[in-house]
Image (tube, coloured by chain):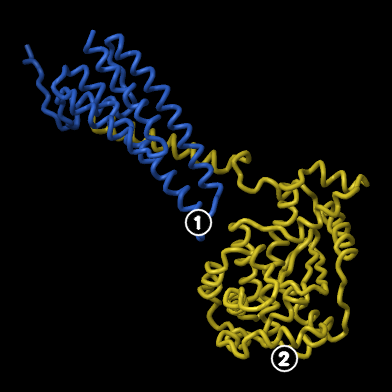
């Protein structure tokens, strides 16, 4: 039971830190890093969810940071102006954050039930990292076939 | 496995790249949503109404010498605009404020105080090119729509005037544009000056002198309230690159005589302006 709660906590911790750290988009990332390292000796199930929570927020953190930096430049620099491109970017970032929030909740619920839940791309990376699966090209990997009888 | 990861990363890039593009070009996210809300015909009617209102409150200066000089400057600018929706009208008002403003429909007003403050016709042309930029980019009408809403503006045009026309005229004459609009008008003005064979450096010399003389005499620098952030605008004018082979064409007129036709306080104000300005030699080359 404790294990499931720890796995779920990886996602919930991230949201709590996100709320507390706004408008600085880096706080949630720091919280996720701390959470991952404090649970490094836990089971692979917990480590998987902690690592997935950590690496999956790298792109959104980066996008939020760019939006914040861009917005500040517009507000305080004479040569930067509010453009349609910026508005489009902010809208895209907001949508990405919302999508990430929804998937994070789903992942937290799945973790609470003791299930794995794989995000696109990040789920695979976290799984490979935690279960020490080496990346190899299927075409070049040695194929062990049974003897022909 | 490696291919699968690359494919996933590409999928994410494509999805979010497409979302960015969609949100950028989707009309609801457009920064300037108002340019086509008011037709040119409506803008012209609104302009006539506001011009009438302004002329009821301010005295227009009509002087043959001034009109000829102004026509020389404005004709050169207007003939280089290219395709335009407006039939430009330039009027000089008897007002000591150093300012100029644009009303809807291509109506540009220049205060006599501004003409007296300029050191050359090129400096006046630089200010007017900037105002033409506001008109061409439809900044004024957009501003009015934002300030008063379409309903109020249309009610004025359909006869329900009351005191609101006065309020609209007051806003139109003292409006402060945002930095993006000022930069757009400046940029348009620099290009127009170049096409008109006037060195855009005249804009820098005029603006720099305004900055330098602010607070040093009793002149009314209203232009500072309506055109803030002068330093970056001076820098933009200084850094504007004219095309190779650009040669400025001087107006060849006695600008002091033109200014003298504006009235008695001209001499007093002229005394307050510096005798020499190193930039002026470049602005009139």
Residue for badge 1: A80
The residue drawn where x is 78% and y is 67% is B108
Q: Quadrant of the N terminus of chain B?
A: top left
| Residue B68 locus on image (x, y percent) | 83, 84
The residue drawn where x is 64% and y is 67% is B224
Q: Is residue B236 left or right of residue B135?
A: left
The residue lying toward the viewer, choosing from B215 and A72, is B215
Tell me, by letter, which chain the rendering colours blue. Answer: A
Q: Would residue A37 be seen by someone viewing this image from the given angle? A: yes
Q: Is residue A112 left or right of residue B64?
A: left
Instruction: Sort mark 1 into few (<14), some (14-19) or many (20+) by Cα contacts within 10 Å.
Output: some
- Rendered view: B278 above or below B228: below
The residue drawn where x is 72% and y is 70% is B99
From the image, state whether disc 2 or disc 1 is nearer to you: 1
Tell me, by letter, which chain the rendering colours yellow. Answer: B
The residue drawn where x is 41% and y is 35% is A22
Residue for badge 2: B252
- Rendered view: B30 above or below B125: above
| Residue B82 locus on image (x, y percent) | 72, 68
| Residue B161 locus on image (x, y percent) | 90, 48
């Amino acid at each position: 039971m404790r294990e499931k709660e720890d796995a779920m906590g990886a996602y919930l911790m991230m949201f709590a830190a996100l709320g507390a750290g706004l408008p600085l988009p880096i706080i949630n990332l720091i919280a996720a890093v701390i959470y991952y390292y404090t649970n490094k000796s836990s089971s692979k199930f917990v480590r998987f969810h902690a690592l997935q929570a950590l690496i999956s927020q790298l792109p959104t953190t980066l996008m939020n940071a760019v939006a914040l930096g861009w917005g500040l430049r517009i507000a305080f620099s004479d040569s930067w102006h509010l453009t349609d491109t910026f508005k489009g970017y902010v809208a895209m970032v907001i949508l990405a954050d919302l999508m990430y929030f929804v998937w994070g909740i789903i992942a937290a619920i799945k973790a609470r039930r003791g299930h794995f839940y794989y995000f696109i791309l990040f789920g695979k990376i976290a799984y490979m990292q935690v279960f020490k699966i080496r990346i190899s090209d299927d075409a070049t990997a040695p194929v062990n076939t049974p003897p022909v009888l | 496995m490696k291919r699968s990861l690359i494919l996933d990363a590409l999928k994410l890039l494509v999805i979010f790249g497409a979302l960015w593009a969609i949100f950028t070009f989707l009309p609801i996210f457009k920064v300037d949503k108002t340019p086509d809300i008011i037709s040119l015909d409506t803008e012209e009617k609104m302009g006539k109404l506001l011009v009438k209102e302004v002329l009821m409150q301010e005295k227009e200066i009509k002087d043959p010498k001034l009109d000829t000089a102004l026509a020389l400057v404005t004709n050169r600018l207007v003939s280089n605009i290219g395709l335009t929706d407006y039939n430009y009208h330039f009027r000089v008002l008897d007002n000591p404020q150093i300012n100029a403003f644009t009303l809807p429909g291509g109506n540009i007003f220049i205060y006599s105080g501004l003409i007296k403050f300029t050191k050359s016709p090129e400096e006046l042309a630089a200010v007017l090119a900037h105002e033409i930029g506001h008109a061409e980019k439809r900044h004024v009408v957009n501003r009015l729509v934002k300030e008063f809403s379409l309903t109020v503006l249309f009610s004025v045009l359909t006869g329900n005037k009351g005191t609101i026309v006065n309020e609209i005229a007051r806003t139109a004459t003292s409006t402060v544009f945002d930095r993006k609009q000022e930069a757009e008008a400046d940029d348009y003005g620099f290009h127009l000056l170049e096409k008109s064979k006037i060195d855009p450096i005249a804009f820098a010399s005029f603006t720099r002198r305004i900055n330098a003389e602010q607070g040093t005499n009793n002149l009314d620098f209203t232009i500072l309230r309506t055109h803030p952030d002068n330093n970056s605008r001076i820098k933009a004018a200084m850094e504007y690159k004219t095309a190779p082979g650009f040669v400025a064409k001087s107006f060849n007129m006695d600008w002091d005589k033109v200014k003298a036709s504006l009235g008695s306080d001209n001499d007093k104000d002229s005394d307050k302006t510096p005798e020499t300005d190193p930039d002026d030699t470049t602005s009139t080359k």
